[in-house]
Each structure stands twice: as C-alpha cells, then as structure tokens.
Amino acid sequence: MRTTLDFSPLFRSSIGFDRIFDLLDSAGRVEPIDSWPPYDIVKTGDDDYRITMAVAGFTEDELTITQEPNLLVVHGAKPGEDEARYLYRGIAGRQFQRRFELADHVKVVGAGLANGLLTIDLKRELPEEMRPRRIEIARGTALPKAETPRIESRTKAA
C-alpha cells in the first residue's frame, strides 16, 4: 500500500521550500534498487564528505563524473563488449549510472581512481553573505524615539 502525501496546502503559506517538497515527493517514489556498484558515503569534516565507489575494471577514461545543480551523476561504460566466450563471468563490467542528490552549496572538489576505488571529495561552501556574522552594538548613540500615534475619536463623551 502506497500513501501519497499532498503538499499543495503548504504552498499557500511557504515560499522557497519547493526543493524540499520535491525531494520528499521523489523519496516516496518506488524505484528499482540497483546495488551495483557498491559505494560508501563518509563525513570527513564539518563541511567535507567523501563518496567511495568500487569500480574494479574501469579506467579513468571509462568513467564520467558530472555535477549539475544539486545533483552528482557518476557514469561508467566500457567502449566495446568483449568477444571472449566466458565459462563464468563474476566480474561485473556492465555500464552504470549512479545519482546522488546534493544539498545547496555542495561542490565537488576532487576525484581520484586507485586500486579499483573511485573517490569523490565534496565540500559544502556557504557564500559569505549566508554565513553567521556578528553585529556590533554602537555605544553612546541612541536610536531616535518613535512617536506613539494618537487615535482621535469623533464621538463626544456624554
């Protein structure tokens, strides 16, 4: 049984949360689970992350890493299928595409391939205007007082 949530009432009272509602909606969709290639996601610092994928048998030329807005796509494909007649094939060499949803301001800072492991380093970089800042309090200067508005009544007291 699948329950569908309707977020339309929230659109009336919220502004700028469209992406969150889209993410919640897409998380509820049932997609086939493909567990190949296996991967790990590790938080290496306060704003640093690393994705490690096991891509044995692939070279740098056969892998493509693309960053789109709020999305990281890793694609692997072999140029031509091997003509050999396998008695048993246990090493997967099929093409794949793995997609990772990224939060706002997360950027890929580097990638490397060693010993069959593809590592992708990510960093969240907040723009300067979005970082917390301290507001200085001025000494000896007071803000001008706001006048209290007077409400006049047209009715006369009896």
Image (cartoon, rainbow, N blue to C red):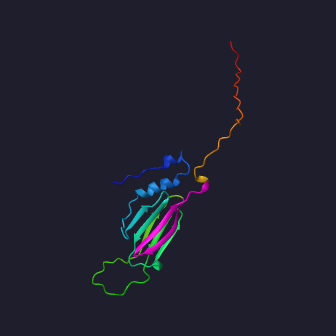
Considering every residue shown, the one lying at the far front of the view is 139
Give the magenta part as a residue range: 105-128
Residue 115, placed above or below residue 123? below
Query: Which image quarter is the C terminus in?
Result: top right
The percent coordinates of residue 82 (x first, y second) are: 37, 85
Q: Which residue is more in the foreground, 135 or 79?
A: 135
The tally of labels here is 0
Residue 145, placed above or below residue 32? above
Give yes or no for residue 56 being in the magenta stretch: no
Residue 126, placed above or below residue 62? above
Residue 157, placed above or below residue 55? above
**Residue under the point 30% across and 78% down:** 90
Please state if 128 lies on the left or on the right of 144 as rendered.
left
**Residue under the point 39% across and 83% down:** 81
**Residue under the point 64% across and 44% down:** 136
Give yes or no for residue 118 being in the magenta stretch: yes
Quarter assignment of residue 62: bottom left
Query: Which image quarter is the N terminus in?
Result: bottom left
The percent coordinates of residue 125 (x first, y second) are: 55, 59
Q: Which residue is more in the foreground, 33 or 76?
A: 76
The percent coordinates of residue 143 (x first, y second) are: 70, 36
Please state if 93 lies on the left or on the right of 156 as rendered.
left
